[in-house]
Image (spheres, grey):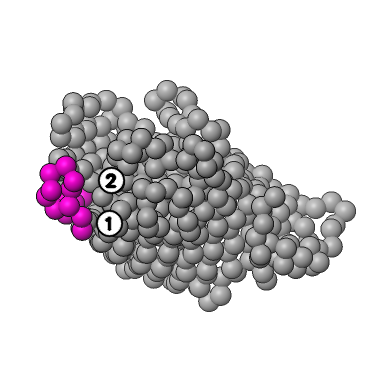
């Protein structure tokens, strides 16, 4: 049984306020985003790839979400969401609802509680400053704590919004298998955001609360500050992040898992990063209304502080540049084109001792339903 000190208090308050109507009102929505295009991709040391791309501007997903009015300002909520690969018609991941599978309660005076598989609060609050999510070259390229990732067995609480301010807390329970070292670490994440008429700002913190691996003596953690200001015809965005002892989103490739031959370390990043390494990153973006669309430029910089065991050389700073245009064909359909370049940037693991470079150009179509 999952135990959390806040859960009994929250449910007691919610349930005590309910007077169930005879026929409660309910709502169900089917929604989704389809995105595909044609691209050219080249990463140093690998063959060029020309052809179709899935999710050039944003992930292709479909989902169901619903709510039921329980009376007295309370609602029951749920969300089921799955990523799809338009190039094959298959699920992009093995799980049916890999993006979200959560159920919750909401009260206008007490906030919202969700249980299940879901994006961390911190990731949701930070991703709002991203101007364009060009595949592998957006905000999450170097700030992997803001990249799209999910946590299983997750409890999340969101406060109501007060004068534009909202806070959120998230907790993922541990699932340990001591004999094989295949496990799910215990994680905590918290975030605060402000959303005004023109200004959006957020601050977040993530940490793996414990690790039982002898290879990771320190806990993975990430701190990020993000902001965006809308000048109507012009939008500016910026963010800063410090990531330590591995990627909290477990989205940094297989270097550590292969080095120590421990599957549970997949996604943490390079072994040097796990063992006391630190990365400071900055992100700057601008969007200019131009014609019936937007011209979008983004730039990111990441500075690692370790030396590679393989070469004994200091890890080089990474830079990612992108420029693109999004044209609104309608309120739900967009045509886009972008070019992007990553210096010393590996598409899967970000940092590598061979200082890979990556580039991509694409043109595609996005439709929301």
Number of the label disc, if any, that sits on residue 261: none
Q: Is residue 303 above or below residue 57?
A: below
Residue drawn 28% across and 42% down? 349
Which mark is drawn over residue 277? 1
Circle 1 Cα neighbour tier, 10 Å, few/some/many (<14 / 14–19 / ≥20) = some
The number of discs equals 2
Location of residue 44 in the rendering, given as x and y in whole percent from the top left corner = 15, 34
Pick the residue in front: 351 or 111. Answer: 351
**Can residue 308 be found in the magenta stretch?**
yes
10 on left or right of 216: right
Q: Quadrant of residue 88?
A: top left
As drawn, the label of residue 270 is: 2
Above or below for 332 versus 6: above
Structural crowding at the residue carrying mark 2, measured as other residues with C-alpha within 10 Å and reported as few (<14), some (14–19) or many (≥20): many
Determine the residue positioned at 47% across, 25% down.
Answer: 90
Against 350, residue 220 (above or below) is below
Residue 79 visible somewhere in the drawing: yes
- Extreme top residue here? 88
What range is drawn magenta here?
A: 305-325
Indicate whether 306 appears above or below 60. below
Hey, which residue is sitting farthest right in the picture? Answer: 22
Q: Nearer the viewer, residue 164 or 212?
A: 212
Return the residue nearer the eye: 86 or 318: 318
Which residue is drawn at the image coordinates 39% and 49% (left, top)? Answer: 214
Quarter of the image holding residue 202?
A: bottom left
């Amino acid at each position: 049984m999952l135990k959390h000190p806040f859960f009994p208090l929250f449910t007691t308050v919610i349930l005590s306020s309910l007077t169930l109507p005879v026929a409660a009102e309910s709502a169900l929505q089917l929604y989704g985003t389809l995105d595909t295009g044609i691209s050219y991709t080249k990463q140093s040391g690998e063959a060029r790839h020309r052809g179709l791309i899935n999710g050039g501007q944003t992930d292709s997903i479909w989902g169901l979400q619903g709510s039921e009015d329980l009376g007295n300002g309370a609602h029951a909520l749920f969300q089921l969401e799955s990523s799809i690969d338009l190039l094959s018609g298959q699920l992009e991941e093995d799980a049916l609802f890999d993006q979200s599978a959560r159920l919750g309660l909401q009260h206008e005076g007490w906030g919202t509680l969700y249980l299940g598989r879901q994006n961390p609060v911190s990731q949701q609050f930070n991703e709002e400053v991203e101007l364009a999510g060009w595949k592998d070259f957006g905000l999450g390229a170097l700030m992997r704590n803001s990249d799209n990732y999910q946590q299983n067995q997750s409890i999340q609480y969101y406060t109501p919004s007060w004068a534009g301010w909202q806070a959120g807390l998230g907790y993922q329970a541990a699932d340990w298998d001591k004999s094989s070292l295949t496990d799910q670490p215990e994680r905590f994440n918290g975030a605060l955001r402000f959303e005004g008429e023109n200004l959006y700002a957020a601050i977040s913190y993530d940490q793996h609360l414990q690790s039982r691996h002898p290879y990771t003596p320190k806990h993975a953690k990430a701190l990020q500050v993000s902001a965006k200001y809308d000048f109507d015809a012009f939008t500016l965005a910026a963010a800063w992040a410090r990531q330590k002892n591995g990627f909290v989103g477990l989205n940094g490739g297989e270097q550590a898992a292969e080095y120590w031959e421990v599957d549970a370390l997949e996604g943490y990043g390079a072994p040097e990063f796990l063992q006391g390494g630190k990365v400071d990153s900055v992100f700057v973006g601008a969007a200019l209304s131009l014609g019936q669309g937007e011209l979008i430029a983004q730039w990111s910089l990441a500075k690692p502080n370790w030396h590679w065991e393989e070469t004994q050389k200091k890890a080089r700073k990474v830079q990612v540049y992108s420029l693109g245009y999004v044209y609104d064909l309608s309120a739900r359909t967009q045509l886009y084109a972008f070019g992007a370049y990553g210096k010393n940037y590996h598409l899967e693991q970000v940092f590598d001792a061979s200082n890979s470079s990556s580039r991509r150009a694409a043109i595609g179509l996005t439709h929301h339903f």
